[in-house]
Image (cartoon, rainbow, N blue to C red):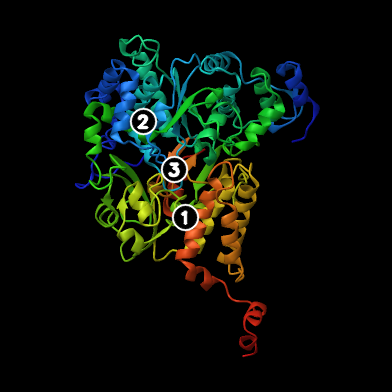
């Protein structure tokens, strides 16, 4: 199993501080590193007060959508006589993203603790950690951590002697990207096909088993104990002074054509150029970067001109023409054919479409077909317009955003790297003739 | 699916052990041995206490079947259906949705190679070629003649920074290159 890189001096390791320390995986090791103090503190607090601290900290969802966590928690209404659930989204499958995997591999108790605090804050009696089936090592670590926590009385009917019940169960997925979509995850947990549900009702009203549910990403929950221990102001202290909307630190998974791939943790607002060239070491020797996807495969592709000026936070990436997404940074060097790689991304979405909505089922399949024929030199000049038209039909029209996610790299790719597509499309005799009769005669 | 009688009947009333199987390598007309007996049954009963519905234990139960039998046969689907008060058709609908459940027997070593974009730009397709060659599978999804290997491409294994990740059954190996493939396969029976 791969070990993480040595922490770079410009990193701010909060969640990743103990990555690479096998001793941090055990309960004793975690306690020796200050673990479970935050949970102890939380269990002595009024649950609503915990939500207020999280709200004040400015913590936003780290799974991709960036919804304020404290606000999400405040939608839950404990004491309404219904069961309440917390779902932990550990179905990390967004191409380019592997941060939750490392949190669970190296610091499983951080997630157990964060989940227990969240469950207590929102009044959820039961928590399910839904981990994708391919994550054999994270599953093993999480199962061991939960078992240890139960044996030590941290979880169970009398959590840490507080008289409060906190239950956490690990649930293994079975291979479906779509189960990372929150309502698909709930369907899957219930033993159904992982089809996303139409919203509303939102999970806080009718989620898992039709009961009020909150669902949070692994990284989001792992940050909660630190916020509780150090306070909301400490967390707000990370980030740009001129952008209070993005606070805290963020884990970025760096992969593709880059010298030092791996997980890096930096405060919000970090300059993207420094990140790519100083921390990640720039492109492989003798190459140069051509393009980057900064937030997992579902966000727009950036040119290096756009990337050079970007600041790494929710608003900074939007201003630079993309999105923070899940923080999966995929790099492409000058040897890569963008058409080929965008076609490969489209194939991913076509494979992972749950096929519920026509626009997605047909759209992802046709997008892939057309892109692959362009890649293979069989494209026609009309194909690019067809792709753009398809992308428009695939955006904002389906139950979930998988279809939109397929359209995003296609649109940004064609817009920003059009010449690469055109170079592969040789104008046919008939279309040239139609456009300019003189050219056909010449 | 053959759609033959036994599997259908099983989900309705009769006991799984009284039925015959017509799939897999057990040979024709061998009685179906239920998966959920003894310790595995006890495990399932414990699992059911974690969820408010029986149906929620479906994915875990199917995992138990696959761990025990190597794949999920129609008979096993029917057994699970009966235990969880579902219909075999419903269970099949769920099994076919998820890519990790095998609906056919596969090689002893089931090899999954990630070829999605981040691994693709790092040369994952060459790893696939090397695996197909060294396992003598020749083609994706085909089991080698000696029954040892099946190689498939898989969409994003979530280890993009450690390209190329390969899973061999439950073993997750990072940073595989065409050069390390022979070493990776060495010692596998």
Estimate the x, y position of residue A310 in percent, counting from the top left.
31, 56
As drawn, the label of residue A70 is 2
- Residue A23 seen: no
Mark 2 and mark 3: Cα distance apart in space: 28 Å
Estimate the x, y position of residue A208 in percent, counting from the top left.
53, 25
Asked if the residue under mark 3 is in contact with the one under mark 1, i.e. CB atoms within 8 Å, the reply is no
**In this orientation, which residue lies closer to the viewer: A70 or A345?**
A70
Q: Chain of mark 3?
A: B
Q: Which callout, 2 or 1, points to the residue nearer the camera?
A: 2
**In this orientation, which residue lies closer to the viewer: A315 or A224?**
A315
Q: Is residue B169 above or below residue A432?
A: above
Q: Is residue A303 above or below residue B75?
A: below
Q: Chain of mark 1?
A: B
Q: Which residue is mark 3?
A: B158
Q: Which residue ends up furthest to the bottom in the rendered image?
A: A442
Asked if the residue under mark 1 is in contact with the one under mark 2, i.e. CB atoms within 8 Å, the reply is no
Asked if the residue under mark 3 is in contact with the one under mark 2, i.e. CB atoms within 8 Å, the reply is no
Dot 2: what SS? Answer: helix
Question: For this view, does B48 lie left or right of residue A151?
Answer: right
Same chain for mark 2 and mark 3? The answer is no
Estimate the x, y position of residue A60 in percent, counting from the top left.
36, 37
Mark 1 or mark 3, which has the lower sequence index?
1
Mark 1 and mark 3: Cα distance apart in space: 13 Å
As drawn, the label of residue B120 is 1
Dot 1: what SS? Answer: helix
Q: Residues within 10 Å of mark 2 (few under 14, many from 20)?
A: many
Question: At 51% from the left edge and 49% from the top edge, which residue is drawn?
Answer: A405
Question: For this view, does B23 lie left or right of residue A95?
Answer: right
Q: Quadrant of residue A126?
A: top left
Dot 3: what SS? Answer: loop
């Amino acid at each position: 199993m791969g070990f993480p890189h040595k922490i770079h001096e410009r990193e701010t390791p909060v969640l990743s501080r103990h990555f690479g320390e096998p001793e941090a995986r055990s309960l004793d090791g975690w306690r020796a590193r200050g673990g479970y103090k935050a949970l102890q503190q939380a269990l002595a607090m009024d649950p609503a007060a915990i939500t207020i601290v999280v709200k004040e900290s400015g913590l936003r969802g780290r799974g991709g959508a960036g919804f304020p966590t404290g606000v999400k928690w405040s939608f839950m209404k404990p004491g309404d006589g219904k069961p309440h659930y917390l779902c932990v989204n550990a179905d990390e499958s967004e191409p380019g993203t592997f941060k939750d995997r490392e949190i669970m591999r190296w610091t499983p108790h951080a997630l157990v603790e964060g989940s227990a605090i969240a469950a207590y804050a929102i009044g959820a009696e039961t928590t399910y950690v839904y981990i994708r089936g391919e994550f054999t090592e994270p599953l093993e670590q999480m199962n061991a951590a939960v078992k240890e926590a139960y044996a030590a009385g941290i979880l169970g009917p009398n959590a840490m002697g507080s008289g409060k019940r906190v239950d956490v169960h690990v649930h293994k997925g079975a291979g479906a990207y779509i189960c990372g979509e929150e309502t698909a995850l709930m369907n899957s947990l219930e033993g159904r096909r992982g089809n996303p549900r139409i919203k509303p009702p939102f999970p806080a009203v009718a989620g898992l088993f039709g009961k009020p549910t909150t669902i949070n990403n692994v990284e989001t929950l792992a940050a909660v104990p630190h916020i509780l221990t150090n306070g909301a102001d400490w967390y707000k202290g990370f980030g740009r002074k001129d952008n209070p909307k993005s606070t805290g630190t963020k884990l970025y998974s760096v992969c593709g054509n880059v010298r030092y791939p791996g997980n890096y943790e930096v405060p919000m607002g970090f300059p993207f150029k420094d990140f790519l060239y100083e921390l990640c070491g720039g492109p492989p020797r003798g190459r140069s970067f051509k393009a980057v996807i900064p937030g997992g495969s579902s966000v727009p592709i950036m040119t290096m001109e756009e990337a050079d000026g970007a600041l790494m936070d929710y608003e900074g990436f939007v201003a630079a023409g993309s999105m923070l997404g899940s923080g999966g940074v995929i790099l492409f060097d000058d040897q890569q054919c963008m058409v080929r790689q965008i076609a490969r991304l489209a194939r991913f979405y076509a494979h992972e479409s749950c096929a519920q909505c026509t626009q997605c089922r047909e759209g992802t399949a046709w997008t892939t077909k057309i892109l692959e024929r362009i890649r293979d030199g069989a494209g026609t000049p009309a194909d690019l317009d067809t792709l753009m038209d398809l992308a428009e039909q695939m955006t904002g029209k389906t139950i979930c955003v998988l279809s939109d996610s397929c359209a995003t790299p296609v649109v940004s790719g064609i817009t920003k790297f059009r010449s690469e597509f055109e170079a592969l499309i040789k104008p046919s005799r008939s279309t040239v003739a139609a456009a300019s009769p003189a050219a056909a005669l010449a | 699916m053959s759609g033959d009688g036994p599997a259908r009947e099983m989900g309705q009333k009769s006991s799984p052990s009284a039925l015959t199987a017509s799939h897999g390598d057990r040979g024709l007309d061998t009685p179906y041995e239920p998966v959920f007996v003894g310790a595995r049954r006890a495990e399932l009963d414990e699992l059911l206490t974690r969820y408010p519905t029986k149906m929620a234990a479906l994915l875990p139960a199917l995992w138990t079947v696959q761990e025990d039998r190597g794949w999920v046969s129609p008979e096993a689907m029917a057994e699970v259906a009966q235990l969880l008060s579902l219909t075999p058709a419903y269970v099949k609908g769920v099994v076919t949705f998820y890519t990790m459940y095998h609906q056919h027997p596969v090689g002893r070593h089931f090899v999954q190679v990630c070829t999605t974009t981040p691994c693709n730009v790092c040369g994952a397709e060459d790893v696939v070629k090397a695996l197909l060659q060294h396992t003598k599978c020749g083609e994706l999804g085909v089991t080698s003649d000696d029954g040892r290997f099946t190689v498939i491409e898989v969409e994003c294994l979530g280890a993009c920074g450690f390209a190329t990740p390969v899973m061999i059954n439950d073993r997750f190996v990072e940073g595989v290159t065409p050069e390390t493939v022979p070493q990776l396969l060495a010692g596998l029976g």
